[in-house]
Amino acid sequence: MIENIYKELYSKYSFEERINQIEMSKIIEEGINTNTPVLLEAETGSGKTLGYLIPSINYALKEAKNIVISTNTLNLQDQILNKELPLLKEIFGESIKYILIKGRNNYVCKRKLEELVMNSNDNKYIDLINNIKKAPNGDRSEIKYRINNELWNLIKSDKDTTFATKCPYYKSCYFYTMKNKIENCNVFVVNHHILMLDHIIKQEGNAGLIPKYDLVVVDEAHNLENIVRRYYSLTFNFKEVFKNIGQLYSNKVKDIESAGIISKVLYNISNNNVEFFIDDIKEILLSNIDNIYYSLVKLMKYISEVYKKITISGLLAKNIDKLEVSGILEEVFESNLILKKEITRLVNFLEERDDLDQNNLRILLSNIYNNLDTQLNTLQEIFDINFEKYIYWINLENDNVYLVINATPYSISKEFGENFIEKVRKIIMVSATLSVGKSFKYIKNNLGIEDAIEKNIKSDFDYRNNMNIFLPDDIPLPNEKEFNEVASSFILDYVEKNEGKTFVLFTSYKDLMFVSTYLKNSSKKLNVLTQGDLDRMELIKNFKENKNSILLGTDSFWEGVDVQGEALSNVIIYKLPFQVPDDPIVSSICDRLNEIKANSSFIEYQLPYAVLKMKQGVGRLLRSKYDKGNIIILDKRIHKKNYGKTILKSLPDANIEILDIKDILLK
């Protein structure tokens, strides 16, 4: 059956036959038929997207089941939605019905947009409105108008301010229109965040974001662990909670319009002969809100005094279980119990009194309080969970004032394996970087996968003839003070000689800024594009369109960037991509592994991570079988240290040369 589909595909579109692609589809079909998870490392150029879509869609149509395709990057989502799925619809027919599922916050709220315009005294939002009208789905990514986050927060749809079916725009609501379309589809394209959010919501016994499905394909699966960890973690942000309390009630306002929702509700019903109710409830509400606020201020000050060196990047909160916070927390939770009872009483009162036109305010009051209640429940959970199984750290918000308390499991493998992998079973994990030295042990251990079909799928790229990997031998080590100067000087000379066409990938923003400043001060020829100067898509567009361009990027540029042809002919790796050793999560996991087995953390955790990250970075260079170019790894530990062999063995079978800097410049 699979072969017949490929025959039609090759015939209809004059595609070149790929044996490895067909093999990949057969392996996936075997996994589906035997209810066994599949792990596939498919190199760039192996045709992996069609390789998994064909057997997955074939299963969905044959068995009348729903399937999910999950990706990490927008680029891949766009490729699947605008290229691969329309193409396969021509093969499989109209029975393929696919849709992109996004979170609510990606859509414009028509009611909030109308309120914004009505409250404005001029016509400054006309361009915004005209551009939104041209966006058929009301999706932020469709709107050809630069909307900063501050403006977007005023007009986006969100659960705290939705009136749902009570909204006058409900029938034409962008978000609910998308939700209604979902019911008629059988292929759901999502990102990993939506996949995990849906999983968590369903685990709590609620209706998820994605309809019931029987098969999930996780592309770019090397990113999944970090996203799973995020959803299995707990975060209590004092700034967000204080903001939420201010939305409920604030006594620091001049007029009712800027007051909290409780003040608005009580003010609006004060003219309806219900003073008996207002007098009874107002003092209880406000006194308990004050109790919660001042108790939380006391808690934040106490934690700040105990952990004196808290920074934006975070401080490991050792012995957090020894903090004397039980009295403060008791004050918070007792006041919240009373507040919940009185909020419920107020909401029920408004609901029962038909003569009070308070429907919108009632809905907002419920939503805002429920959000606060959820945040306070998280705080309670943080101090109630098993301290031995969690890593705790505290960081400052960007304003250097408010604290954020974080807790994440040492390992997510057991819980994720039992609650997701074992329940779904028909799960296909695909990436260009899943294995370390041909072994899938690292990804299996991290995600709790016990049994799986495992396969490395090669591409038809001629790496030996089309890619050179140069390793400078006479460059200082990265920890030597001369390294940045020597490396920057080399990058300048090399990139000017090659007329740009170069990505430089960094592991730290500090190094990136050093090189950026050096190049901008030293060269008038180069178009130096630095991450942070423009948004990601504009940087890449500028890079493609302008000669003598060099793009400097950190984490997000190591993957998901696709520049084909001569425009990108060189990728320079500044340092080996090891994780930051003093990161709270990294240092804690390393300590735990070393407790179990002395000095095991580097081989079992840090090195595999660096291998997969390096493979991603090197993978930026050849994006088609016709591309050619050079990789230069400036960190000479890769050929001076024993562990460097592990990294090199995991890279494509290219031509590798160890040379002095001057000889690389002659290449």
Image: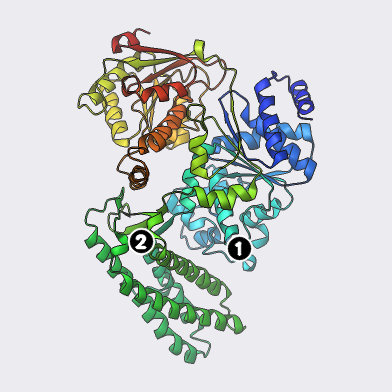
Q: Earlier in the sequence, mark 1 or mark 2?
A: 1
Q: Which of the two residues, 377 or 109, is positioned nearer the viewer here?
A: 377
Residue 424 visible in rendering: yes
- Residue 207 sits in quarter: bottom right
Per the image, label 1 sits on a secondary structure element best described as: loop
Q: Is residue 234 above or below residue 69?
A: below
Q: Is residue 449 above or below residue 507?
A: below
Per the image, label 2 sits on a secondary structure element best described as: helix
Residue 543: where, in percent of width, then height?
44, 26
Q: In the rendered image, which residue does mark 2 sit on? A: 239
**Residue shown at 66%/54% (left/top)?**
179
Q: Which of the two residues, 541 or 321, is positioned nearer the viewer here?
A: 321
Left or right, 101 with reference to 496? right
Residue 75: where, in percent of width, then height?
55, 35
Q: In the rendered image, which residue does mark 1 sit on? A: 205
> In which quadrant of the rendered image does the C terminus lie?
top left
- In contact (CB < 8 Å): disc 1 and disc 2: no
Callout 2, which amino acid?
Lys
Measure how far apart labels 1 and 2 are at the Cα level.
29 Å
Q: Alpha-carbon neighbours of circle 1 within 10 Å: few (<14), some, or many (≥20)?
A: few
Colour mode of the rendering: rainbow
Callout 1, which amino acid?
Gly
Query: Total number of numbered labels?
Result: 2
Q: Is residue 620 above or below residue 112?
A: above
Left or right, 312 with reference to 234? left
**Residue shown at 32%/36% (left/top)?**
509
Which one is in front in this view, the residue at disc 1 or the one at disc 2?
1
Residue 440: where, in percent of width, then height?
52, 33
- Residue 517 sits in quarter: top left
Residue 624: where, in percent of width, then height?
56, 20
Q: Is residue 316 above or below residue 439?
A: below
